[in-house]
Amino acid sequence: METESHSTFLLEFHTPKDKFSSPDELISPIKELLEKNIGVFKEVYRRCSDESVNVVLDCDMKSIATLQLKSSGLILMNIDIDSQHSSAFTQELAKKFEADVKGKLAAVASKSICPIKRGGPLDRFRYLTSSDERLLEYDVDRVVADVHSPFQHIQILHTINFGNLLVLDDLQNLAESDLVYTETLIQRGKIDYTGKDILILGAGDGALLWELLKEGPNMVTMVEIDETVMKLCSQHLRSACGSALDSTTGPHHQIIVGDCLTELDKLKSQSVLFDFVFSDLTDIPLSIKPQNKEWQFLLDVMEKSLSVLKPDGQFLTHGSGVSSVQSLADFESHLKNMEPPVEFKRCQAFVPSFMEDWVFYQVSKTLHNK
């Protein structure tokens, strides 16, 4: 029998500071309301200091409530509900419980957050984060693939709203719902790719290759390091990649399995130039100092890509979510200070499975370098 989801409710209450001196006057009414809504709770732990009182309440060794009473008047409360009690304490009842506690404590403000679900058969696949590390919940109803390649953790999750969703190292990459991502990246309708030579770095899901092949290019060369990603996407993400990944060569495309930096060096040494270079690799890091390797990788990719770009060519890439303001600013600062100098434009589009607006860049060499 599969384990059902356990739910964690997060609540906070703001009470007058002077109530901290009598913690039982705060704890007792909370305990009474817990027993009224869930079951009999026993206090199993308490630790006190001048700054806080921490209490653990246990219900039948299944559900647990933890209280942190702060000298500032803040009360933090977590209620971990066992699956046995889940039907007795729903989100609707949690809102009523919050209102009742607020009234009993004469709190000036309160807040409850919808429950986090853990322990169920699909719960560990349910949560991902936005570009600026806010929690997102997905309606996953089936795990299509869950494997580790030599390079990364690859998952394809079926979601009710977005179809199959590719997740790499716990980061959402592309879903069947996300044609807008690819169309915005290639600036469909704004750039003519007819007869052009194009280089793609990354984009192992195959969607970028598939959409570019519809634009009448001369040749699209794609460099992807992870064969496993391409194999799984060709099987389970066909509404996005079509037949683009079925063969490594075709009349207008070739796929090279390898490291993009190594391949860029080879192309430069052979004096191969492209009209367009697409980088669909890692996202812009959130900060500079803790993640120098990621930043250096992105800068190396851009520098090497510009070296194989024709004088009037363009480098196109994705940035991050619009809420990652500092990351985008850092990236644009790098663009503004590049040598030789470049010009860039940016645009954005709402990507369904990302649940946020995403920023895209079009970079070209400055006019006096053309």
Image (spheres, rainbow, N blue to C red):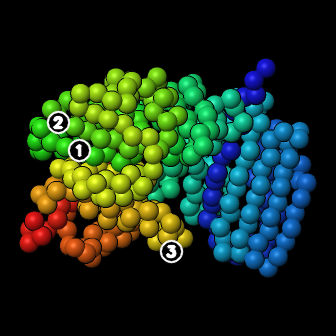
46 to the left or right of 257: right
Residue 340 or residue 17, whichever sits in front: 340
N-terminal of the two: label 1 or label 3? 1
Disc number at residue 324?
A: none
Query: Which residue in the rendered view is the most extreme toward the top?
Result: 1
Which residue is painted at 57% across and 64% down in the image?
A: 108
Label 3: element kind? helix
Disc number at residue 217?
A: 2
Disc number at residue 198?
A: 1
Q: CA distance from mark 2 to mark 3?
A: 40 Å
> Which residue is tagged 3?
289
Give residue 278's position: percent from left, percent from top.
29, 49
Which quarter of the picture shows residue 301? bottom left
Q: CA distance from mark 1 to mark 3?
A: 33 Å
Which residue is painted at 84% across and 51% down in the image?
A: 57
Whether label 2 touches label 3, CB < 8 Å = no
Location of residue 81 with respect to 297 vertically, above or below: above
Location of residue 257 with respect to 160 vertically, above or below: below
Give residue 213's position: percent from left, percent from top.
23, 31
Residue 341 or residue 331, whichever sits in front: 341
Q: CA distance from mark 1 to mark 2?
A: 8 Å
Give residue 20's position: percent from left, percent from top.
74, 72
| Mark closer to the observer (2, 3) | 2
346 to the left or right of 238: left
Query: Which residue in the rendered view is the most extreme toward the front?
Result: 270
Whether label 1 touches label 2, CB < 8 Å = yes
Location of residue 143 with respect to 282 vertically, above or below: above
For badge 2, the amino acid type reads Pro
